[in-house]
Image (cartoon, rainbow, N blue to C red):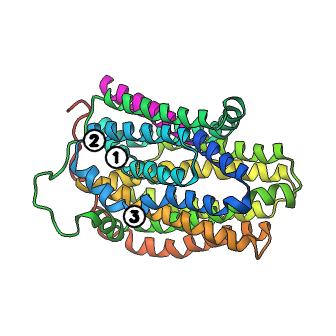
Amino acid sequence: MALDPGARRDLRLLIGLATVSALGDEVALIALLLRVARGGVASHGWYVAALSVAGALPFVALAGPAGLVVDRVRARPLLVGLGAVEAVVAAGLGLWRNDVVTVLLMGLLSTAVAFSRPGYSALLPSLVGLENVAPAQSGLQAGGSIALAAGPALGGLLVGAIGQGGPLYLDAASFAVAAALTARLRGEREPTRADAVRERGAMLAGARVIVGSPTLRPVVVTVGVLMLSLGAINVSEVFFATVTLHASALGYGVAGACLGAGSIAGALLGGRVPQDPARLTRDSLALIAVIGGMLFLAGLSVDIAMLWGVVLVIGVLAGLVNVLFAVLFTIEAPAEVRGRVFAAATGVFTTAQMGSMVIGGALLSAISPRTIFLLAGGVAAVTVAAVIPLERRFGRRAQGEYRVRSQPPGATGV
């Protein structure tokens, strides 16, 4: 990765702040889940649902406004301000334990994150240049995978040691650290067309790019279906491991560790992916199809050891797909609407996650956990098999239509 010293410094800061923030989020999630669990299922079932909706709905409802703001406002001041808001709200979650207040604060926190997430995604090319996006995304995804693997265990330890409020204060501190590191970045993404007359439908520009792109559209469709499948599996996985396969709590925990370890390895492998849009699309579709097949194979597991091996492979594939997806969207989204493209994609995937909560719960009451694994894997694989012929047919047409035609600002140009 040919980066000048300033860009290399910015990338290290970005990876550090992303990893710290993700770790804080994972720790806070465990604390909130344990808070809910201690309330009892009968009295707090509504609370679980409300908390889930509050955490997901802003990403769907605000996808258009968030992306537009990201594209029209200078990146660093926006992200520093959002980080400060996130820190205050996370501290409030630790301070106030009233159920209604917690749900409201969760919604407010998710609203801020709905703006900051596409902001950081859109900022990356301005820090490292489009030619270095793949190795940069590899580092970012690896940091996120480390946080995902270590966060739940750390959260559980902290709740036991310092109570439920402590991890939430730690999450607040992680947002504050992220804001401070963002302020130290030298690179900047200047607003595009900030003084232009507001065109009609500007908030939907990102969605229009995705729908009209022969490279982005098939990936969004298949990843959305995969998210639905994984969501249904997430509801049933604990029962599949502990009841169907008779695993201990430790055995179930090792399965999660295998997924995290695999994701780290896959993210690191992604640093060498080619930055050719058509190939990125083909490789993403192929890997998603393989993930579907591996989910089906997981449903055939005869013991927990077999499940560990399959989950490890799924983690590697998922980590690699995450990098492929991020690189594809970064280089294909036109610079002037890049924030809106990332926000629109996040909205689609969050909608799939919300739907998967309902589907997974309904399926679990009707069929066995093993059948859910088999069904989810089959649906993901069949969907990709249906999309690939369409991608081959249209992939060559207008291949460069939505490609970025100009380099972003230099890594040190503020």
Whole-percent x, y for residue 295 in the image: 70, 62
Range of magenta residues: 1-25
* Mark 3 crowd level (few <14, some 14–19, many ≥20, 10 Å Cα): some
Of 355 and 11, the residue lying toward us: 355
Q: Earlier in the sequence, mark 3 or mark 1?
A: 3
- Disc 2 crowd rating (10 Å Cα; few below 14, some 14-19, many 20+) is many
Q: Amino acid at mark 3?
A: Ala
Whole-angstrom CA distance, mark 1 to mark 2, is: 7 Å
Quadrant housing the C terminus = top left
Element carrying mark 2: helix
Q: Does dot 3 land on a helix, a strand or a loop?
A: helix
Q: Circles 3 and 1: CB distance less than 8 Å? A: no
Q: Is residue 115 left or right of residue 410?
A: right
Q: Which residue is mark 1?
A: 119
Which residue position holds label 2?
A: 75
Residue 413 appears in the rendering? yes
Q: What's the distance in space between the residues labelled 2 and 3, CA to CA?
A: 22 Å
Quadrant holding the N terminus = top left
Front tag of 2 and 3:
3
Check whether the beta carbons of the residues at disc 1 and disc 2 lie within 8 A of each other. Answer: yes
Q: What residue is at 36 percent from the left and 60 percent from the top?
A: 62
What residue sits right under mark 3 in the picture?
Answer: 61
Q: Position of residue 195 (x, y in %)?
A: 10, 52
